[in-house]
Image (cartoon, rainbow, N blue to C red):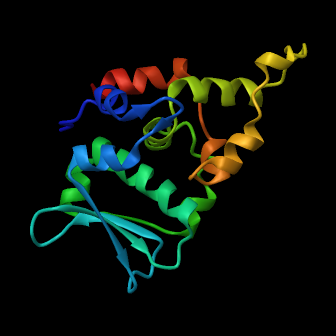
Amino acid sequence: MNLFNPQQLIKSASEGDTINLKKICQSLGLKLKINNELTDLCRIAFDENGNAVIQLNASLDKRTKFTFVAICAAEYIINSERVRDTGVTYDIFFLRDIHANRATNLIMLATRLAIPEHIIEKIANASEVQFTKPPESERFDIDAYIEQSDYLPEFIRSVIKQSSSKLLLDSLS
């Protein structure tokens, strides 16, 4: 059973054009640990003290780490019982399929835990085929946003507009 209200969590961690992922993890009680012995890229599970821990492979770059933290936080919100029972492990194959799986509850929620809704709307609009050219003042430079972001480009490009994801957030609340 889900005990977290994602909309409230996102709202409390929103800071202008960013979302404070560290604050979300603190609110969820998630601990972060770099694990030099982890053979996969990432794992979320409960430790022997009953704490939910996101373990990240030490070889990961900053963007991959941030992306996995957002995904693990979403996993914990959606499937906390699975995390408690068996844990969830992510490998290179999962990472390669992020964009293909963008319509899953996991990726839709993860992108919302990482990127504010008004930015998601701009990214989605910029990614759509436009039949007319928007005025210069309304153009969103997705490449510049990705360059400044802490997340993997394929994760950012996996966002889906609010109308599709609102159902997910409402059902989890």
Q: Quadrant of the C terminus?
A: top left
Residue toward you, 121 or 150: 150
Does residue 92 appear left or right of residue 53 in this picture?
A: right
Relative image position of residue 63 (x, y in whole percent) = 57, 59
The answer to whether 68 is drawn above or below residue 142 in the figure is below
Residue at the far right: name it. 132
| Rendered image quadrant of residue 137 | top right
Asked whether 10 or 72 is in front, the reply is: 10
Q: Residue at coordinates 52% horizontally, 79% vertically from top-left?
A: 59
> Quick one: which residue is furthest to the left in this view?
49
Q: Residue at x 36, y 67 (%)?
A: 43
Q: x and y percent of residue 1 in the render? A: 18, 38
Q: Position of residue 42 (x, y in %)?
A: 42, 68
Residue at 68% across, 41% down:
145
Query: Whole-percent x and y of residue 169?
Result: 37, 26
Q: Is residue 15 left or right of residue 2?
A: right
Residue ID at (59%, 29%): 120
